[in-house]
Amino acid sequence: MKRFRFRLERVLKLKQQRRRVAELVLRQASLALQQARTAVFGLTEDLRKKAESLETEIGSEMSAGQWLAHCEHAAQLERSLVAAERTERLAADKVRDSAAICTRLSTEVEALESLRRQQWQQHSEDTQSEYQRDMDALAMIRWERGKVQGDTRK
């Protein structure tokens, strides 16, 4: 009986390893996206609070230095928010690209595993068929021996 051998086993193992790496990259990209979203949310909240604090100052006297400090702080928050939103978009792109790679690799692995199962099934059927032929041949040999021995006893 021949031993089962899947000729694409090394390719399958390589694709499985690449899929695991791609899944890890996807998890890391998802984490980076979550962190970027948290940063955007935090900066948006800071900017909202700054706007509220400026609203409470409306109508009261404020020195030019205080007004400039508030405006500069708000401008800095806005620049930080724009940078954080850019980082969020890049992180979202990375998640999308990583997910596409994971999907492609998963499809390739599933196709190879399906091919392996089909070849295993064929090997199993061939092995069973070969075993049955051997058993039939053995039965015929025994039957022939029994027939010959039966003829010599007469």
Image: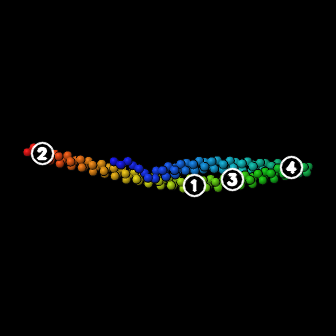
Q: Which one is closest to the eye, mark 3 or mark 2?
A: 2
Question: Is the C-beta separation of discs 4 and 2 under 8 Å?
Answer: no
User: According to the image, label 1 marks what residue?
Assistant: 101
The kind of residue tagged 4 is Ala
Q: Please give the name of the residue rendered at 91% of the width and 51% of the height, measured from the top-left corner.
A: 64
Number of the label disc, if any, that sits on residue 150: 2
Crowd tier of the residue under label 4, counting other residues whose Cα lies within 10 Å: few below 14, some 14–19, many 20 or above: few
| 142 relative position to 90: left or right | left
| Sequence-first tag of 4 and 2 | 4
User: According to the image, label 4 marks what residue?
Assistant: 69
User: According to the image, label 3 marks what residue?
Assistant: 88
Question: Is the C-beta separation of discs 3 and 1 under 8 Å?
Answer: no
Task: Residue 51: tell me if it is visible.
Answer: no
Crowd tier of the residue under label 2, counting other residues whose Cα lies within 10 Å: few below 14, some 14–19, many 20 or above: few
Q: Please give the name of the residue rendered at 8% of the width and 45% of the height, measured from the top-left corner.
A: 154
| 65 relative position to 123: left or right | right
The kind of residue tagged 2 is Gly
The Cα atoms of the two marked residues, 4 and 3, are separated by 28 Å
| Sequence-first tag of 2 and 1 | 1
Q: Which one is closest to the eye, mark 2 or mark 1?
A: 2
The kind of residue tagged 3 is Glu
